[in-house]
Amino acid sequence: MFLKANQIMAKDPISVPTIANMESCKKALQSHHNAFPVINTAGKLVGNIPKSMIVKILEKKSFYDKDQTDRSQVGAGTSDQQDSNGYSLNDNAEQPFID
C-alpha cells in the first residue's frame, strides 16, 4: 500500500528562500519540522534544507550585507530578502549576527 503526499505532508509547508532573512529562519526553527523546501526568487523549488543546517549557518554567523556584496554574478532580476538590520543569510561571507 502506498501513501499519497497529501497524507503525510503539511498542507501549508514552511519554506525558506535561497536568500533568507531572519524572520524566515525563526519561523523554520520554531516549527516541529526537521527540513524545509528552499524556494528561489522566481518561486521555484531548488532544494531542501535540514533544520540542523539552518542552526549551523546561524551559529557560524554566515551573513552578508546586501549593500557590500558583489551580486554581478547572480542572474538579472533577482531580489534579496533581508531582516530589519539589512543582513541576509549567505554561507560565503562573515558579518556579525544582529538580533
Image (cartoon, grey):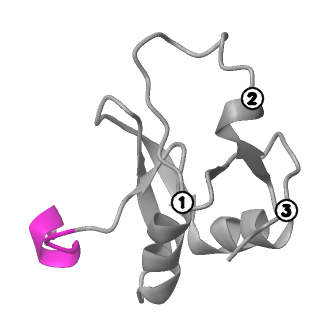
In the image, the segment drawn in magenta is 3-12
**Which of the 4 quarters of the picture holds residue 6?**
bottom left
Disc 2 residue type? Thr
Label 3, secondary structure: give it. Answer: loop
Q: Can residue 18 be spotted in the picture? A: yes
Residue at point 38%, 33% (across, down): 41
Residue 2 quadrant? bottom left
Name the kind of residue labelled 1 in the image.
Answer: Asp
Q: Nearer the viewer, residue 64 or 2?
A: 64
**Label 3, label 1: how far apart the Cα atoms are:** 13 Å
Q: Which residue is mark 2?
A: 69
- Give the residue pinned by disc 1: 83
**90 relative to 44, above or below:** below
How far apart marks 3 and 2 lie (CA) works out to 15 Å
Badge number at residue 96:
3
| Secondary structure found at label 2 | loop
In this orientation, which residue lies closer to the viewer: 52 or 69? 69
Is 9 colored magenta in this rendering? Answer: yes
Residue 85 in which image quadrant: bottom right
Of the 4 image quadrants, the one containing the C terminus is bottom right
Viewed as shown, does residue 59 lie left or right of 89?
A: right
| 48 is higher (above) or lower (below) than 31 | above
